[in-house]
Image (cartoon, helix red, strand yellow):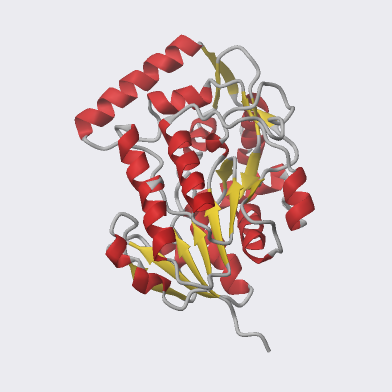
Amino acid sequence: MTAPASVLVTGGHGFIGSHLCGRLVQHGCRVRILARPGADLSGLEGLEVEVAHGDLTDPGSLRAALDGIGRVFHLAGALKGFREADLLAVNRDGTRNLVQACPPGLERFVLVSSLAAAGPSPGGPEPRPEGAADAPLTWYGRSKLEAERVVLASGLPSVIVRPPVVFGPRDRDVLAYFRIAARGFLPVPGARERWYSLVFAPDLAEGIARAGEASLPQGAIIPLVNPDPVTWLDLGRHIARALGRRCRELHLPEAAIRAAGQVAGFAARLRGRPEIFSPQKVVEMLAPAWVASPAKARAMLDWTPGTALDQALWKTVRWYRDHGWL
């Protein structure tokens, strides 16, 4: 009998990481997570996982976490900061620290990157062309692209997956839109129609896990997206239906959104704590589209998201309500 795989999940206590850990444990893996001391581990309640304390920015803390590990799923990273250097220090330099600490004979290193590393699609529901040059728009996107380059240059047996907008139980970023819709409003950025690829977190976890198991070419880069992109307004209408609400559509001028981003950025600096909604996030929001093709994931991982959008949103709403988030 083959021994259960020993895996390390960085960011395993986070939103996506906790779903991945659940899937790995369910399939018999021995799971260790890398977490800073004092990290909130509530998302892993009921799961048999080992916790190794360490920090990507502290190379000396990583070797013990990697001892005996056969596969690495690297999800940890910085989403926000006051300077591009803040994100590069974690997403690029932290990734370099991790790959340099990996043991000889590692079976697979899976980097969970982002569509932000590639840049937006041209517009409409058509995906970003295969082979198009990467053109990230934001600090976050550039820092994730730099992390990809570190992994590809490391010589490790690696694969990179690029998720789009992710939603589901335990997510706090898209939660804000659910809360606005629960009050009866659907804000829509600008007058033009913007399209987005999405993915439900449990479905994404399955795709990431398969990227660690499948026979793949070295350095493959695979978007993990739902095959049916939606417009911002359509997503809002689906959310309203899941909430059981009738909502009023509010089309917000782009100038107003940019101004709101500047105000939010200024307020965050006064508080000394960066927030997701910022001038950088506004740049992403006002891009023409963020759509990627599901073809590679189907062909290379035999993966297509198994949860219909309405069902996924309903499950998300139920979890939010059960936990008092809505």
Quarter of the image holding residue 110? bottom right
Which residue is more in the foreground, 173 or 80?
80
Which residue is more in the foreground, 18 or 4?
4
Task: Identify the residue at image location x=63%, y=22%.
Answer: 194
Task: Identify the residue at image location x=50%, y=40%.
Answer: 145
Quarter of the image holding residue 234? top right
Which residue is more in the foreground, 21 or 191?
21
Residue 173 in view (yes/no) = no
Instruction: Where is residue 96? Give x, y as percent.
Output: 40, 53
Horizontal side, residue 172 vs residue 292: left or right: left
Instruction: Where is residue 312? Give x, y as percent.
Output: 66, 48
Instruction: Where is residue 89? Give x, y as percent.
Output: 33, 44
Quarter of the image holding residue 164? top right
Task: Identify the residue at image location x=66%, y=56%.
Answer: 207
Instruction: Where is residue 103? Give x, y as percent.
Output: 45, 71
Above or below residue 83? Residue 318 is: below
Horizontal side, residue 162 vs residue 226: left or right: left
Work out which quarter of the rendered image holds the N terminus and state it: bottom right
Task: Identify the residue at image location x=62%, y=63%.
Answer: 212
Residue 96 in view (yes/no) = yes
Count of numbered badges drawn on the protein:
0
Q: Residue furthest bottom?
A: 1
Above or below residue 143? Residue 129 is: above
